[in-house]
Image (cartoon, rainbow, N blue to C red):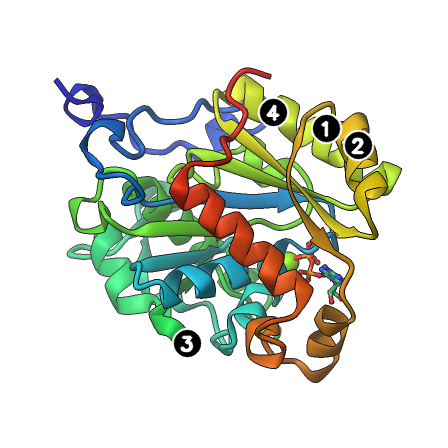
Amino acid sequence: MSARAQATPLPYPRFWATVGRRPARRRPGVVDDGEWAPGERPLRIVVVGKGGTGKSVVSGTMARVLGRLGRPVLALDTDTMPGLAQSLGTKAPPTPPLAEAVEKAEGGCWRLRKGIGPVRAVQRFSTVAPDGVRVLEVGDNPTSGVQSVTPSSQAFYQVIHGLPEAKSFRTWTMIGDHPAGPRQTAHDWAPYADTLLVVAEPTWKSALTARRLAALAKARGTATLLVATKVCGRRDADRVAEIVGLPVSAAIPADEAVVASDRLGVALIDHAPSCPAVQAIEGLVDSLISGTIHPVTDQ
Ligand SMILES: Nc1ncnc2c1ncn2[C@@H]1O[C@H](COP(=O)(O)OP(=O)(O)OP(=O)(O)O)[C@@H](O)[C@H]1O
Ligand SMILES: [Mg+2]
């Protein structure tokens, strides 16, 4: 019997129940291992790390590269601050798109409106970025602030918890971009992801945050992939590996093109499609697809 068939339905996501307690465990059977031809297994990744390490550049560029390879890709932006949209080469919606998907239920909590399940919510409220990448955002509304972010983020949480078992998205690659730090990882904001891609710069603060995230991944039973960013040579990557205590699976060089694309407000892959950083990210995607690098499952 396949892992998918064995997986028992899990209870309705209890966001607040995870706060202050042990981190929620990864769901079993996110992607069924047994049924994929070599190289066909969809990637299910969430990119995490300290603030400003390059999470959005990595996740957005990976999504575009995979879109170009013809994969159906859903990019999931958990960050209310803009980041992923620019790295994908699209515009973040002006208001949180999922705000229309929820209503207040008895007892004052938010629930998805009748007739809107996770699949329909993605179909209706995601947008399409270049290379056919679909993007679903928690979103932000600078004018009404928390009043509109709360229902939208509750809706987002409920939607992503329906994605692992959504048959219509079975073949879809999913790439999440988390805000800085460990909070979203601890509180299960990427139940679709079987791999935590931990990004770290060669600095102590960044690498120590990565170490904490890797420990959290271990506690949740999620595989970890360590990616060193903004590196100037082999020694920088070795330093990241040493502090975090994991092997570095890919090293993305410090690249002026990334800074320049950010200044211009355009996606790196559009601004400098063959720059060293894009090449490194393409190499990472290739290795993940071909299975030549393996996330660490037993740290
Ligand atoms: N490989 C790189 N070389 C040079 N600069 C980089 C590289 N990767 C990212 N940067 C720069 O670092 C900054 C942060 O990048 P990015 O927004 O992707 O990080 P982030 O981790 O998503 O940040 P946040 O925590 O705010 O969401 C940007 O100014 C970007 O241009
Ligand atoms: Mg970001």
Please name whichever residue, 90 or 235, is drawn nearer the observer in this view of the structure: 235
Gap in angstroms between the C-alphas marked 3 and 4: 33 Å
The residue labelled by disc 1 is 211
- Horizontal and vertical percent position of residue 280: 61, 55
Gap in angstroms between the C-alphas marked 1 and 3: 34 Å
Q: Amino acid at mark 1?
A: Arg
State how many labels appear. Answer: 4
Please name whichever residue, 281 or 215, is drawn nearer the observer in this view of the structure: 281
**Disc 3 CB within 8 Å of nearest ligand 1 atom:** no
Q: Amino acid at mark 3?
A: Pro
In terms of sequence position, does the residue under pointer 2 or pointer 4 come before the other? 2
Residue 138 visible, this orientation? yes
Badge 4 element: helix
Binning the other alpha carbons within 10 Å of mark 4 as few (below 14), some (14 to 19) or many (20 upward) gives some
| Left or right of residue 203: residue 86 | left
Q: Amino acid at mark 2?
A: Leu
Please name whichever residue, 38 or 53, is drawn nearer the observer in this view of the structure: 38
Q: Amino acid at mark 4?
A: Leu
Q: Residue at x 55, y 18 (%)?
A: 219
Gap in angstroms between the C-alphas marked 2 and 4: 12 Å
Question: From what the image shows, is residue 154 above or below residue 195?
Answer: below
**Disc 2 CB within 8 Å of nearest ligand 1 atom:** no
Q: Which mark is residue 208?
A: 2
Badge 2 element: helix
The residue labelled by disc 4 is 216
In terms of sequence position, does the residue under pointer 1 or pointer 3 come before the other? 3
Q: Residue at x 30, y 64 (%)?
A: 70
Residue 22 visible, this orientation? no
Badge 3 element: helix
Binning the other alpha carbons within 10 Å of mark 3 as few (below 14), some (14 to 19) or many (20 upward) gives some
Badge 1 element: helix
